[in-house]
């Protein structure tokens, strides 16, 4: 299982941030040719089709998708390189949540949520998921985002195929601190 987890992290690096490490290119929608991807990965570590399919199938966050004939693969969101993963624009619920570490709280309260190295700010549909995300970075801090109000003011929202809500930014006056631990 550890090998799958390590390979999953490497796959995330390749498909979201650094495809050139495997000598591949992503198309404008973030798709990579599966055979070229595996060939590139095999330069530094072992992988076969069964392992790749197992990583996609068992990933708890559903980070990856195959196309219909399973000849291409992409990360569903989280890119730092410019791709259009064909996110579905939707009206968000009244509230979404963002989990982060407490050490970022003051900056977020001042500047709002920004995508940083990513293309979008990632938001969770519930505070429990946001707490899990925030705890990856230290002691979690949860912000409730008044997403319905933002949408009414013209901010577009998108939802990836794995349910992650995204927007380009969330100004601080739409944020409320929900939890300190």
Image (tube, helix red, strand yellow):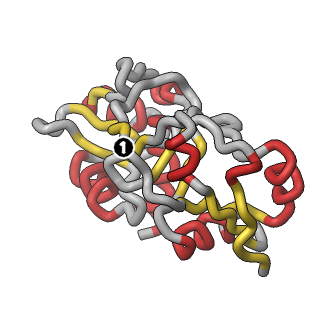
Q: Position of residue 103 (x, y in %)?
A: 86, 61
**Left or right side of 94 for 80:** right
Query: Which image quarter holds the C terminus?
Result: bottom right
Front one among 69 and 37: 69
Give the residue number, with chain letter if any, for mark 1.
Answer: 90
Count the marks: how many? 1
Which residue occupies 27% across, 46% down? Answer: 48
Task: Report the front residue among 102 and 92.
Answer: 92
In this view, the residue farthest toward the bottom is 181
Q: Quadrant of residue 163?
A: bottom left
Is residue 111 found left or right of 152 in the rendered image? right
Badge 1 marks a residue whose secondary structure is loop
* Residue occupying the point 46% across, 50% down: 165
- In the displayed structure, would residue 99 be above or below residue 132? above
Q: Is residue 135 left or right of residue 159?
A: right
**x%, y% of residue 8?**
44, 53
Q: State the residue at coordinates (55%, 30%).
A: 18
- Of the 4 image quadrants, the one containing the N terminus is bottom left
Q: Percent position (x, y) of residue 65?
A: 29, 45
32 is higher (above) or lower (below) than 12: above
Residue at 45% across, 22% down: 23
Horizontal arrangement in the rendering, residue 170 relative to residue 123 (left or right): right
Q: Residue 17 lies in what quarter of the image?
A: top right
Q: In the figure, 140 relative to 149: above or below?
A: below
Q: What is the crowding at mark 1: few (fewer than 14 residues within 10 Å), some, or many (at least 20)? A: few
Residue with the most extreme left position? 69
Give the x, y percent position of residue 81.
55, 26
Q: Does residue 55 appear in the picture of this structure?
A: yes
In the foreground, 75 or 23: 75
Looking at the image, can residue 47 be seen? Answer: no
């Amino acid at each position: 299982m550890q090998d799958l987890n390590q390979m999953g992290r490497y796959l995330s690096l390749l498909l979201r941030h650094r495809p050139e490490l495997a000598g591949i290119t992503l198309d404008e929608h973030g798709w990579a040719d599966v055979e070229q991807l595996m060939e590139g990965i095999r330069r530094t570590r072992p992988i076969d089709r069964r392992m790749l399919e197992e990583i996609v199938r068992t990933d708890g966050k559903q980070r990856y998708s195959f196309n219909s004939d399973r000849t291409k693969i992409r990360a569903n969101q989280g890119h730092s390189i410019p791709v259009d993963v064909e996110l579905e624009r939707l009206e968000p619920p009244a509230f979404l949540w963002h989990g982060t570490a407490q050490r970022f709280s003051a900056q977020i309260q001042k500047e709002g949520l920004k995508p940083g190295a990513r293309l979008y700010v990632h938001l969770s549909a519930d505070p429990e998921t946001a707490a899990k995300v925030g705890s990856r970075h230290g002691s979690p801090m949860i912000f409730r985002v008044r997403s319905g109000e933002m949408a009414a003011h013209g901010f577009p929202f998108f939802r990836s195929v794995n349910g992650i809500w995204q927007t380009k930014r969330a100004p601080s006056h739409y944020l409320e601190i929900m939890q300190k631990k």
